[in-house]
Amino acid sequence: QVQLVESGGGLVQPGGSLRLSCVASGFTFSNTAMSWYRQAPGKERELVARINNSGSWTNYADSVKGRFTISRDNAKNTVVLQMNSLKPEDTAVYYCKAIIGSGYWGQGTRVTVSS
């Protein structure tokens, strides 16, 4: 079955960096577009970044452009979200999603940006 396992979250000071990873299994990863979403306390889940199956196309929410980078390694079935210049408003649970049918979600990894 489809499985997505995120890791890399934690507590970081404003201005710091974190690297989130999502390891996928149970489907043909190299044929599948992937995305990262986040959900802050009391807010709706929002799209952060998307990447196509080959990695040749990416798209970002305006709030993270220039600070976050999405990438993938199809040999390792992994999609990565590199987050730099983190702000307190980036605090959220981050989820990866496989774009298959209505979508498959991981369990999420918590990111807290605070001094």
Image: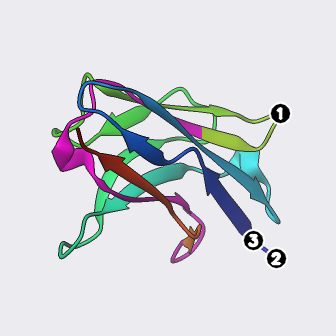
Question: How far is mark 2 from mark 1, CA to CA?
Answer: 19 Å
Which residue is denoted by mark 2 in the rendering? 1
Q: Residue 6, position in %: x, y?
A: 61, 55
Question: In which quadrant is the N terminus drawn?
Answer: bottom right
Q: Amino acid at mark 1?
A: Ala
Q: Residue 37, position in %: x, y?
A: 38, 57
Residue drawn at (57%, 70%), measured in percent from left and top? 107
Q: Are marks 2 and 1 in contact (CB under 8 Å)?
A: no
Question: How far is mark 3 from mark 2, CA to CA?
Answer: 4 Å
- Please determine whether, in this image, residue 51 is positioned above or below residue 2: above
SS state under label 2 = loop
Q: Residue 99, position in %: x, y?
A: 55, 62
Residue drawn at (79%, 55%), measured in percent from left and top? 28
SS state under label 3 = loop
* 95, 77: nearer the viewer: 95
Q: Residue 93, position in %: x, y?
A: 39, 61
Q: Where are the magenta residues, as a range?
A: 80-103
Q: Is residue 73 left or right of residue 42?
A: right
Quarter of image, res 42: bottom left
Q: Are marks 3 and 2 in contact (CB under 8 Å)?
A: yes
